Amino acid sequence: EEAQANNLAQGLPTPGEADFRLLNEILSCDSWESLQTRVRTAAVEGELSDKTLSALQQVMQQAVGRGEQEDPRVVSSLEQAGQLIQATLAQMQMPPAMQLLDQLLMLDPQSEAASIRENLQAAIGSGQVTAAESLQTVDGLMDMMEQQEVEIEKRIEEGTATDNPEEFQEMLNLVKARQEAKVRLASIKTVLKAIADEAS
């Protein structure tokens, strides 16, 4: 009852038996890779929802209540599963072009260039997205990242005057991550333009 009250306070729906059953299947996976696959499958089949996340919250609260916080691996594993479920739910709400780019940004443009092209061609060929809207989404993301980079660089300049090396290093890591993402987006854009030219 306390766990349900906490979920309501967080705006999460009350989970049912099916939600706990799905969560149990996810948490029973014997590796992180198989867990990721089960979550993706649940999302594709329409099983994954906010109720799954709510069920996980209840399980976490019960684990802490039993004193299992003494073993940080238990809570850490539940937190990692929760982050994956949250990210997957957020991705499900993205427009198709953004979903596609989100997946392609995880691929290395050098070693996985063929996979990037195949995925783009498949998505465009199936009508999931168009080359034009994908290009527009790429441009929008690149503009957003450039704005974020400017803001981060300003914070870095401010950070150099402080005595917080951890925060400064975090800012540097953010800049590096944005630069890598921009390189990958530029590669995706090149492939998209080539596919659009081939179709015209």
Image (tube, rainbow, N blue to C red):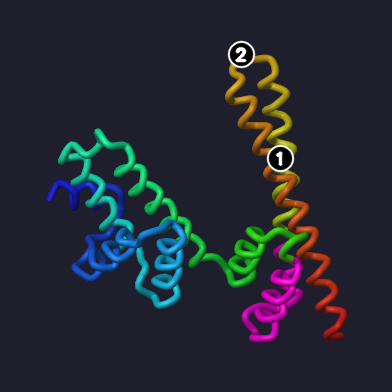
Task: Tell me which residue sits at (35%, 73%) in the image.
Answer: 47
Classify 10 Å Cα crowding around label 1: few (below 14), some (14-19), many (20 and above): few
Query: What residue range appears in magenta?
Result: 113-138
Q: Is residue 57 left or right of residue 130?
A: left
Q: Is residue 137 magenta?
A: yes
Residue 183, image x and y in percent?
78, 53
Disc number placed over residue 166 in the picture, else none: none
The percent coordinates of residue 186 (x first, y second) are 80, 58
> Which of disc 1 and disc 2 is earlier in sequence?
2
Which type of secondary structure does the marked residue at label 1 adopt? Answer: helix
Which residue bears the numbered disc 1? 176
Across and down, in percent, residue 80 comes to 40, 49
Q: What is the CA distance from the residue labelled 2 to the residue labelled 1?
A: 22 Å
Which amino acid does the dot numbered 1 rest on?
Lys
Dot 2, crowdedness within 10 Å: few (<14), some or many (≥20)?
few
Which residue is the site of mark 2? 163
Looking at the image, residue 131 sits to the left or right of residue 52; the answer is: right
Residue at point 83% right, 72% down?
Answer: 193
Q: Nearer the viewer, mark 2 or mark 1?
A: 1
For residue 111, above or below residue 78: below
- For mark 2, give the secondary structure: loop
From the viewer's perspective, is 122 left or right of 183? left
**Which of the 4 image quadrants contains residue 36?**
bottom left
- Closer to the camera, 58 or 153? 58
Residue at 64%, 25% in the rendered image: 168
